[in-house]
Amino acid sequence: MQRFKIFSKVYFAFYLLGLIFFIGMLGYITIEDYGFIDAFYMTVITVSTVGFNEVQPLSEEGRLFTSFLILFSISIYAYSISVITSYIIEGKLKNYYIDKKVNKQLKNISDHVIICGYGRNGRQAAHSLQMHKKKYVVIENKPELVSKLREEGKCILIEGDATDDELMERAMVSRAQALITTLPKDADNLFVVLSARQLNSNMTIISRASEDSSDKKLRKAGADNVIMPDKVGGSHMASLVLTPDVVEFLDHISVEGMADINLEEITFSEIPSDYKFKTLRDLEARFRTGCTVIGFKTSKGEYMINPGADTEISPNSKLFVLGRPDQIAKLNSILNIKRHES
């Protein structure tokens, strides 16, 4: 059905060409008593207007039929050629096979992130996910951004409106780990959050918001986190005035895996079974990687800064670890953490 919708004009052009050829051959067979081959030959040279000699002199009826056939076929032939050529030049044929490849990738994808909107915030989110080698799917409907993404070929792209439930299902939202919606309008983000939460009750949903009043609405709709870029940006600039060195230090701590200092989170499920329900002291004594546990999230969702060595590692808890890239890599290797792999 989708293929027919995309190539409907091409199919119609071929239908018109076939119809004019059928009428031409039928006319020559009926009027001039031509055989099949001669009728086909006469139709070809007439429709294409190449000017080759006739098979035999035409009767008056044959000449009249040929005149009308030429008049009708010129416009149909020109229309058909222009439609077929435009599909090749404009890249519609190429895009069809790109979308076909995307559909194959989507059939097997899971534990991925869906990004709705590839504006400034969407691009930044995609960049961070790409640095982590995390699988992600972009839903975008602006032609210029769609064209750019297709040329780059770095992500799985679905062209269309993110508020369309069919596109959300095509992006395999039911198997996604998270969804990030960065659409310009808060109303659109609200609709996406509502739809996504209904389709997947377990995934993490992060939404962009422009108005303060949208925060509560988005959270009620199912968003786990609501980010206001303008507010965050203004707060960051003010902090650069009040505590510039602190902010610069925090900016130096990267979660992209390429800076001098990296911040990593480790969930309870990633801790070796022998060390679950034990203390941070036991864990650090066993795995000496040089990393430092700077934060801890309890099973109740409470955060602890610089947790004590006697803090117990319990279900649903998380550790926040600071270290150099090589130290983080060593820690991931020891704990067999593979979430950054594609």
Image (cartoon, rainbow, N blue to C red):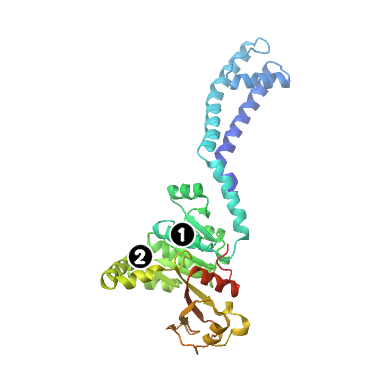
The circle drawn on residue 127 is 1
Tell me the amino acid under the disc marked 1.
Answer: His
What residue is drawn where x is 29% and y is 73%? Answer: 243
At x 55% / y 28%, what residue is drawn?
76
Which image quadrant: the C terminus? bottom right
Query: Is disc 2 placed on a helix, strand or loop?
Result: helix
Q: Is residue 30 left or right of residue 70?
A: right
Instruction: Using residue 206 as the reference point, say whether residue 93 is left or right of it.
Output: right
Where residue 279 sits, quadrant-wise, is bottom right
Q: Position of residue 16 (x, y in %)?
A: 59, 31
Residue 13 vertical placement versus 197 (above, below): above
Tell me which corner region of the image, top left, top right, bottom left or bottom right, holds residue 96: top right
Question: What's the residue at 42%, 60% (across, down)?
Answer: 124
Q: Is residue 58 left or right of residue 234?
A: right
- Label 1 or label 2, whichever lies nearer to me, is 1
Can residue 167 be spotted in the picture?
yes
Q: Which mark is residue 251?
A: none
State whether residue 213 appears in this view. no
Kind of residue at disc 2: Pro
Location of residue 198 in the rendering, given as x and y in whole percent from the top left corner: 52, 69
Of residue 190 and residue 247, the one placed in the foreground of this image is: 247
Disc 2: which residue: 229
Residue 117, position in %: x, y?
44, 57
Gap in Å between the C-alphas at discs 1 and 2?
16 Å
Above or below residue 273? Residue 146 is above
Number of on-image labels: 2
Compared to residue 280, the image places residue 323 above or below, namely above
Local SS, label 1: helix
Counting residues from the start of the chain, the first of labels 1 and 2 encountered is 1
Residues at badges 1 and 2 in contact (C-beta under 8 Å)?
Answer: no
- In this rendering, would 143 be left or right of 170? left
